[in-house]
Image (cartoon, rainbow, N blue to C red):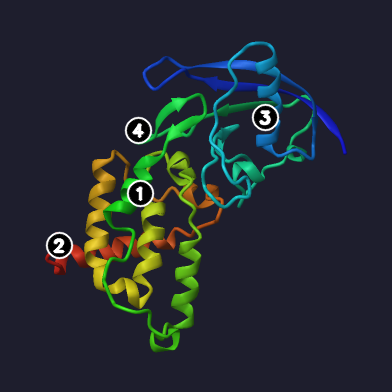
Amino acid sequence: MKNIDITLKVWRQDGPRDRGRFETYEARNISTDMSFLEMLDVVNEELTLKGEAPIAFDHDCREGICGMCGAVVNGRPHGPERGTTLCQLHMRHFRSGDTIAIEPFRAMAFKVIKDLAVDRSPLDNLIAAGGYISVNTGGAQDANALPVPQENANLAMDAAQCIGCGACVAACPNASAMLFVGAKVSHLALLPQGRPEAAQRAINMVKCMDELGFGNCTNETECEVECPKEISITNIARLNREYLKASLLSPFK
């Protein structure tokens, strides 16, 4: 086990209407076995003992599953490691003497609640707009009664890995949610259970995305690079195809 000393430049903002600023903190004797969030816990304990307000940040499972955690570390959502959420990032990836800048996800649709915590409920609104199956089919059918090509099953499962953390939005220069929406649309469009509502789903989710203030995709590919589950941008292409078909042929436009 090795301990390091680092300097943190942390974005502090009291509320969504308040002016934010960077504040500097010294994190001393930090174990390289700690996760990034555990390091923030240590810093917060010291701030609390000094009578200062701790740094607010989102977290829950701390196992890379829930999608709750997220901040921009040295300009990259979830930090420098690929395929990793912020809670899975460990301090062994930094060196003693490093200066680390930490700020919240930046997007018009993600309002800052406090410090590093942002309101990501717009992603929930996108799901409510169509990211589900509502067709009543009675009792569950036997799995063998719904044959799914292996390739489609694999692609659907790859898209279903999305945890809705919002890193794709934070990484995109347009603050686009196309990778998130593309993953949700692909996941269901590739399976027979999702086909009956595929056209309505694509139309409704894209419309909701525009209304919430998310930008459009211009193929910068930062979203794919920063996604902790490495969701492919081919899902954006599938979303575009589903939306185009629905726009031309469906009654839901």
Q: Which one is in front in this view, the residue at disc 3 or the one at disc 4?
A: 3
- Residue annotated with mark 3: 41
Rendered position, 81 above or below 142: above
Look at mark 2 in the image and give the residue it sits on: 252
Q: Amino acid at mark 3?
A: Asp
Task: Find the distance from the CA under tag 3 to the CA under tag 1.
Answer: 36 Å
Identify the image quadrant of residue 133.
Answer: bottom left
Query: Considering only order in the chain, which callout, 1 or 4, is on the residue closer to the N terminus?
Result: 4
Count the numbered circles shown.
4
Judging depth in this view, the residue of 90 and 246 nearest the camera is: 90
**On the image, numbered disc 1 is attached to which residue?**
217
3D distance between C-alphas at marks 1 and 2: 23 Å
* Spatial separation of the CA atoms under disc 3 and disc 2: 49 Å
User: Mark 3 vs mark 4: which is more N-terminal?
Assistant: 3
Image coordinates for residue 118, horizontal then vertical, percent: 45, 32
User: Label 4: which residue?
Assistant: 108
Name the mark nearer the viewer: 1 or 2.
Answer: 2
* Number of the front mark, 4 or 1: 4
Q: Amino acid at mark 1?
A: Cys
